[in-house]
Amino acid sequence: MLRHGLMSAFRALQYRNFRLFFPGIAISQIGIWIQNVAISWLVYDMTKSPLTMGTVMFFNAIPLFVLTPFAGVIIDKFDRHRLLIFVQILFGVQAFLITLLTFLGVIQIWNIVLLGVFLNCIAAIDVPLRQSTFVCLVDDHRDLSNAISLNSTCFNVARLLGPAIAGLLIAHAGVSVCFLVNFLCILPMIFLVMQLKINDVKCAHIKEETILEGLKEGFEYAAKTPEISTLLIYLAIFSFIGMTYPMLMPIYTTEALGENADTLGFLMGAAGVGALCSSLFLAAKTSLVGLRRVLFAGAVVFSLGFISLGLFHTKLAALFAMFAVGLGMTSSITPDNTLTQAVVDDDKRGRVMSLNAICYMGTTSISSFVAGFVAHLVGIANTFIIFGAVMLFFGTVFGYRFSKLKFKSKL
C-alpha cells in the first residue's frame, strides 16, 4: 500500500521529459533561494538601511507587472523549448555577472538594482513559461496535476534548504560564494532543458496575431471565462494577504515572542514543513476530483494559522500556527494552479499562466508595504488577526462560488 502511494505521488517521473526537467528545477530552485538570501544580506551589510532594501525590492518587482502579460503572448506564439533554453542561459548570464562583481569586490548598490531588474525581467518570462510547459512534459495529461504538485514540492524543499545553505556559506565562506553556488546550480538546468524533446504545436491564428492583439485576446478570454477569472481573483486576494507572513515574521518574533533569529528560523522552517506535507499529499492525488474542497479547506487552515499567531504568543503555539500557515498556503494555492491549467484552452495557456504569475508574485511585492503600514498602526498581533479574519471571509465566499462552477477539464 505504501509502495503504491509513493508510486502515485511520483508518477509524473515515468515520462522522460519530466525526469529531465524535475532534477533541474530542484537544483536551480535551491540556487535561487541561496541567491535571494545572499542579496538581502549583501544589501543590508552595505547600507544598514531597511529603506534601501525596500527600494531594491520595489525596483525588482516592476518587470513582473510590465513584462509578464507580454511574456504570456510570446509563450503562446513561439516555441516553448527554444524559449526555455534561452531563458535558462539568461539566468546563467545574470548569475555569472553578480558572481564576478562580488569576487572582484567592486559590487555597488546600483549594480545590485540593475542585475535584480534584469533577473526579474527573465523571471517574468520564466514563471509562466515553466508553468505552461508542464503540459508538454507528461504524455498523459491526467498526470499534469502530479507534475504541478511535484514542482510545488521542489519549491518547498528549496525553501527549506536554500536559506540554511546560504546562512552557512555566508558565515563560513563569504557572500560571494553564494552567488557562485547559484551559478553552478543553473548549469545542470541549462543542460537538461537542452535534452528535452517537446512537440509544441501552435495555432496558425496565434502566429499571425500581433503582440497587442494577442494580449487583448488573453485578457478578454480570462475575463469572460468564469472559472478562470474566479481562480485568478482568488489567487490574487490570498497572495496579497497571506504571502505577507515572511515579511511580518521577523517583527512578530521580536515583538510578540521576544525571541531572536534562531526562533525565526524554526518558525519559518515549520511553515516549510507544512507546505511540504501539503505538496506531497496533492502529488498523490490522481484526479481533479475533490480539489475544490482541498482548496477551501486550505483557505480555512491558512486563515486560522494567521489568527492563531495573533491570539497566542508562545513559541510552541507559534510553531503549530506556522505549520498550519504553510499547510494551508500550499493547499489553497497549488490546487488553484492545477484547476487553472486543467480548464484553460491550450492556445491561451501562456497568457493565462502569465496572469496567474502576476496574481501570485506581483501582488506579494505590493502587499509587503501594506502589511508593514497596518502593523505600524495596529500592532503585529492585531495585524495577523485582521488578515486572518479577512482571508477566512474571502475563503468562505470563494468556497461557495467554487461549488457553483463547473470545472470541466480540457486536457
Image (cartoon, helix red, strand yellow):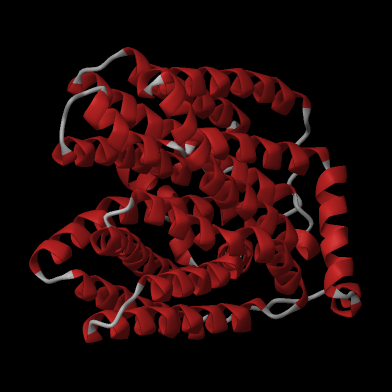
Coordinates of residue 214 in the picture (x, y in percent): 85, 67
Nearest the viewer among 55 and 388 is 55
Nearest the viewer among 260 and 165 is 260
Q: Residue at x 61, y 54 (%)?
A: 357
Judged left or right of residue 307, residue 406 is: right
Judged left or right of residue 305, residue 64 is: right
Against 332, residue 386 (above or below) is above
Judged left or right of residue 65, residue 246 is: left
Against 103, residue 256 (above or below) is above
Coordinates of residue 30 in the picture (x, y in percent): 32, 63
Picture mark count: 0
Q: Quadrant of the N terminus?
A: top left
Nearest the viewer among 123 and 411 is 123
Against 65, residue 190 (above or below) is below
Against 11, residue 15 (above or below) is below
Coordinates of residue 387 in the picture (x, y in percent): 50, 24
Nearest the viewer among 402 and 199 is 402
Q: Residue at x 54, y 83 (%)?
A: 85
Judged left or right of residue 138, residue 48 is: left
Q: Tell me the quarter of the picture where residue 19 sits.
A: bottom left
Q: Tell which residue pokes out farthest to the left in this image.
A: 172
Coordinates of residue 336 in the picture (x, y in percent): 61, 41
Q: Residue at x 46, y 46 (%)?
A: 283
Q: Quadrant of the C terminus?
A: bottom right
Residue 288 visible at all: no
Q: Tell which residue pokes out farthest to the top in this image.
A: 311
Residue 258 visible at all: yes
